[in-house]
Image (tube, coloured by chain):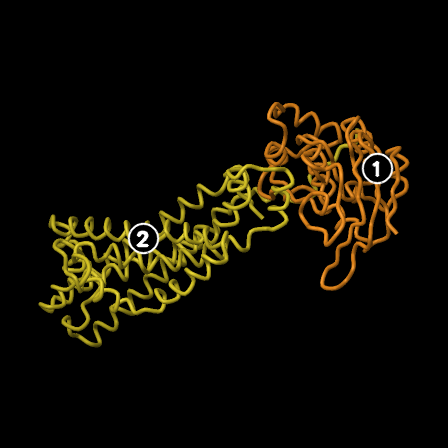
Amino acid sequence: MDIKVVNLNKSFNGQQVLNNVSMAFKNGKITCLMGASGKGKTTLANIMMGLQKADSGHIEGLQGKKISAVFQEDRLIEHWDAVKNIFLVCRKDFTEDYIHKNLNKIGLTDYEKKPVSSLSGGMRRRVAIVRALLAEYDVLIMDEPFKGLDFELKKQVIGYVKKMTEGKTVIIITHDKDEVEMLKADLVTMN
Amino acid sequence: MKKEKAGRKSGHETKPIKKHINKLVIRFFVFIFWIFIWEAACRIINQELFLPSPFSVLLSIIDLAAKQVFWLSILNSFIRIFIGFLLGIVSGAVLAVISYKSKLIYELISPLMKIIKSTPVASFIILALVWISSKNLSVLIAFLMVLPISFSNLLYGLKSTDIKLLEMAKVFRLSGWKRIKAIYLPALLPFLKSAVSVGLGFSFKSGIAAEVIGRPANSIGLNLYEAKLYLMIKELFAWTTVIIIISVLFEKIVVKLIGNYGHDKKYANKP
């Protein structure tokens, strides 16, 4: 079932952030959500994740679905290492070895037994991506997941994300049209 | 495949030993300085009855330590005060969690804590003597002194837990235990340490004060009272020194234990 956003409204302190927003995200596909800054993309993502409530309107197709996410900030447990961070949320059947393999697949090395606070921004971002992908989910929401990655690394990570999310419903918030092309994703814009 | 090394410094280096030794040397000289001041004051006053010398206090401690009643008094007082302290920390933590979850409970408990915090210890001691035996008085008084400290510190810690991490936990459907282990405990530990550190000092001070008024058998308080009553000033100083040593030592041990528990030694460089 597709995810349908129907007439969603949300305001903060009297300022309308979402104004009658309606859109759809195809089931089992990657959809990129684009729009200028301040158009409410993150607010919409937060409402979809159940972190905020809409003032009015509703979302169909998310009931009972498990959500995984890459947040705008990494939101990692700073004093834990990458593997421990991923272990915290990942599927129970995944081993430490499998986590290492996934981290290596996107070029992460020299991360072992180090708190994530000591990793660079790009490394932390990739840890957050692997964490989201190894969690149990039906819908994956990613808020600017590739920010801070250089072009080559971005290509590599996008390839990995595409492979890992085959057949899954993925919503990616981005400002970058190249990312949409690389992902071969559907595009939804917020005006 | 593009590889990247850790960008920031890991910070795993331990404190240089030299720095640690320097710190110890400074502390030693500070200690010697104050002992010297004490000795100087003692010589100026030249009245052992008012201010005994550090050496005579030390001799008095050695003298006391040879008696069984000394150790029995320390043990009795320590156990009672520690029970009160522990009950205060645990009850404060439970009340803080409940208050964090329910605004109504917070509104209900908060004034009570304020009253306990502002009531003079002496009022509590005299009032409590009417209700309970003098033997258990120090337990209750230590408990009452620690309770509001534990409550307010831990509640503040809970309120300052990173909301973004809690949202992450919600999205990933983390169990209660995982949330506690990953998010709440690390956030609470500095506040718990502070509560323990302040609470221990308070519990010893107030617990001994309760013993001085209640005078239970074989207690530090009773020994202090008798030392004062019979003008045994050296013993009074000796007992006071013992209380300070026990309080400081115990605080160091407990704070260290909390630190060791809360810190994954592998990643000791918590940001």
Image-based side of B119 in relation to B48, left or right: right
* Quadrant in which the N terminus of chain A appears: top right
Image-based side of B185 in relation to A5, left or right: left
Judging from the image, mark 2 belongs to the subunit labelled: B
Picture residue at 16% right of the left edge, 56% below the top: B133
Which type of secondary structure does the marked residue at label 1 adopt? strand
Q: Amino acid at mark 2?
A: Phe
Q: Residue furthest bottom?
A: B45
In contact (CB < 8 Å): disc 2 and disc 1: no
In the picture of the structure, the residue carrying the numbered disc 2 is: B85
In the picture of the structure, the residue carrying the numbered disc 1 is: A31
Picture residue at 66% right of the left edge, 27% below the top: A100
Q: Which chain is yellow?
A: B
Callout count = 2
Judging from the image, mark 1 belongs to the subunit labelled: A
Estimate the x, y position of residue B270 in percent, counting from the top left: 56, 46
Image-based side of B42 in relation to A69, left or right: left
Q: Is residue B5 visible?
A: no
> Is residue A152 shown above or below B125?
above
Q: Quadrant of residue A111?
A: top right
